[in-house]
Amino acid sequence: MIRVSEISAIKNELDASSAQNIVLYGPQCAGKTTLAHELSGFEYISLGQIVRSYDDNSLLKQQANCLIHQAKPLPPELGLQFIASDVKEKLSDGKKILIDGYPRKVDEYAMMSGWLESERLPAIDMFLEVTAKRGILIARYAERGKRDMENRDFFDLRYRQYMELREYVGNLAVRRIVYDTSNE
């Protein structure tokens, strides 16, 4: 694990690595999307942005919205359905990707790893964690305004998922960069 405090250090680490399939993870309001836009050479795939872009009448979006409204996690297969075509297209073309929002849980990581293998696509080879102190995250969340049906229960659910995935990722034999945005 490498801890960094500047975006330039992240860029240096990414440039020095051969990582192609990177999971960008962390709690809501940590700055994942902001960081993703600062990193060049990667295709950014955001589960949240993809879900929001779906037609409101689509069955997939209705299922996701129902669970989000109830502050319940999406089943692993539902999240993968949203991002699979983008991931496959970009990795098949040899592009480097940053995936934000999936996997968010251990069962999602297992599902995605199995799917990547079955599709003969590159495995997840790095995790880029973007985090901040919980009090700062809550203040940012209050300032940001809600998206769609999100509420504080939803924020708390996502924070718990982040903490569980963080613990799990810490035990994997994969490169990990941690970037704390608490002082920004």
Image (cartoon, rainbow, N blue to C red):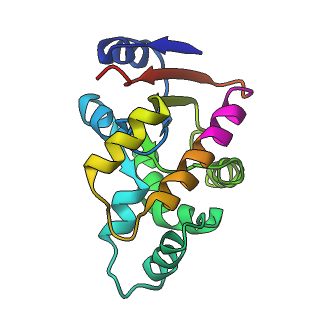
Of all residues, the one furthest to the right in this rendering is 171
Magenta segment includes 164:
yes
State which quarter of the image contains the C terminus.
Answer: top left
What is the count of numbered marks?
0
Relative side of 163 to 43, left or right: right
Among the 4 quarters of the image, the one containing residue 98: top left
> Taking 135 as reference, is 118 above or below it?
below
Question: Does residue 118 appear anywhere in the picture?
Answer: yes
Q: Residue at x 49, y 39 (%)?
A: 25
Is 182 in front, or is 168? Answer: 182
Residue 14: horizontal and vertical position, in percent? 41, 19
> Taking 178 as reference, is 20 above or below it?
below
Magenta segment includes 25:
no
> Taking 19 as reference, is 36 above or below it?
below
Q: Main secondary structure of the magenta part?
A: helix
Is 60 in front, or is 134? Answer: 134
Q: Residue at x 39, y 70 (%)?
A: 149
Is 73 in front, or is 118? Answer: 73
Q: Which residues are magenta?
A: 163-171
Residue 153: horizontal and vertical position, in percent? 52, 60
Residue 120: horizontal and vertical position, in percent? 62, 48
Relative side of 71 to 87, left or right: right
Q: Residue at x 43, y 63 (%)?
A: 151
Residue 140: horizontal and vertical position, in percent? 32, 41
> Taking 169 as reference, is 88 above or below it?
below
State which quarter of the image contains the N terminus.
Answer: top right
Question: Does residue 96 appear anywhere in the picture?
Answer: no
Q: Residue at x 58, y 49 (%)?
A: 104
Relative side of 79 to 36, left or right: right
